[in-house]
Image (spheres, grey):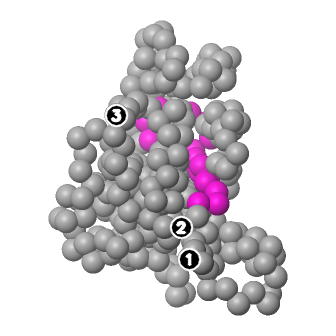
């Protein structure tokens, strides 16, 4: 009899400013890889756009970023958009967003299987990210060690390589990540796609075509709402990223609190 697989949900947090075909491609690559391990059955994917208070330059309003993501994912039968993080009045740490979604997933699972289920295969939630995400752990003041420990040790990462970035090196150079490397899954993208939301915004500001980089429905939405102009790129220009401010001001409770 074939071994039962662990139900797995993939969560991608980020600006999605705007969502691109490459963002959506990450989910497909990650699902294939996790299935190939023989341990997991991917049962869902979640796109979670960051809130407006993140403070990143050129970040358009969350209502637009959520709407574009919903349009982009209309063709997916397993990846959805969740508004919770985007609607928070303040920027939420990634671990807080992970806790919220994991709690919701567990409640849905308990309702679906009933209270008398004896299976040990409770669903898991892992953070889906690009290779460049691991490098953010090196930025002074951006992450606390206990947050990284919780994120990598308790939940886990599914990291998709992009371009010349080498996520394995980032893991090797960090003692904390190295100790938890069994819970970091590296996915290689052999069909290279260097689509960058930053470059997409630059092209849009200059009146250049972004067809085939974004879904047509997203392009139509951008033009209809006049997004990604020279004026919009000045939004938050002098602001300090909220994570750098917040991490220095107030601690976040751990899972045991």
Please state which of the two labelled residues, at mark 1 or mark 3, is closer to the viewer: 1
Pointer 1 and pointer 2: residues touching (CB < 8 Å)? no
Q: Is 220 left or right of 153, judged from the image as shown?
A: right
Quadrant location of residue 182?
bottom left
Between the residue at mark 1 and the residue at mark 2, the CA separation in whole angstroms equals 10 Å
According to the picture, the residue beneath numbered tag 1 turns out to be 3
Q: Residue at x 44, y 69 (%)?
A: 156
1 or 3: tag closer to the N-terminus: 1
Tell me the quarter of the image containing the C terminus. bottom right
47 is within the stretch colored magenta: yes
Q: Is residue 117 above or below residue 200?
A: below
Q: Mark 3 packing: few (<14 Cα in 10 Å), some, or many (20+)? A: few
Residue at figure coordinates x 64%, y 33% from the top left: 72
Place of residue 160 in the rendered image (x, y in percent of width and height, measured from the top left): 38, 50
> For numbered disc 1, what is the local secondary structure?
loop
N-terminal-most mark, 1 or 2: 1
Numbered mark located on residue 40 in the image: 2
Callout in the foreground (2, 3): 2
Q: Where does the magenta region start and end? A: 42-62
Of 4 and 34, which appears nearest the observer? 4
Query: For this rendering, which residue is in front, 1 or 87?
Result: 1
- 191 on left or right of 82: left
Q: Element under label 2?
A: strand
Residue 171 visible, this angle = yes
Q: CA distance from mark 2 to mark 3?
A: 25 Å
Q: Residue at x 53, y 67 (%)?
A: 40
Q: How many angstroms separate mark 1 from mark 3 (CA)?
A: 34 Å
Look at mark 3 in the image and give the residue it sits on. Answer: 192
């Amino acid at each position: 009899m074939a071994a039962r697989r662990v139900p797995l949900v993939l969560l991608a947090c980020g600006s999605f400013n705007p969502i691109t075909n490459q963002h959506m491609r990450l989910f497909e690559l990650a699902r294939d890889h996790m299935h190939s391990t023989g341990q997991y059955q991917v049962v869902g994917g979640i796109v979670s756009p960051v809130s407006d208070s993140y403070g990143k330059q050129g970040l358009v309003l969350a209502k637009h970023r959520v709407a574009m993501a919903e349009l982009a994912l209309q063709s997916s039968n397993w990846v959805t958009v969740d508004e919770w993080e985007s609607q928070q009045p303040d920027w939420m740490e990634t671990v807080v967003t992970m806790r919220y979604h994991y709690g919701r997933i567990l409640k849905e699972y308990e309702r679906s299987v009933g209270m008398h289920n004896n299976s040990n295969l409770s669903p898991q939630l892992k953070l889906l990210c690009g290779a460049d995400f691991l490098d953010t752990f090196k930025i002074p003041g951006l992450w606390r060690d206990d947050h990284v420990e919780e994120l990598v040790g308790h939940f886990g990462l599914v990291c998709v390589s992009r371009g010349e970035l080498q996520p394995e090196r980032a893991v090797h150079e960090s003692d904390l990540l190295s100790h938890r490397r069994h819970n970091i899954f590296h996915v290689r993208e052999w069909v290279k796609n260097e689509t960058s939301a930053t470059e997409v915004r630059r092209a849009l500001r200059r009146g250049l075509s972004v067809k085939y980089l974004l879904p047509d429905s997203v392009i139509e939405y951008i033009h209809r709402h006049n997004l990604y102009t020279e004026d919009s790129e000045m939004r938050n220009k002098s602001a300090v990223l909220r994570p750098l401010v917040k991490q220095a001001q107030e601690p976040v409770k751990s899972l045991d609190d």
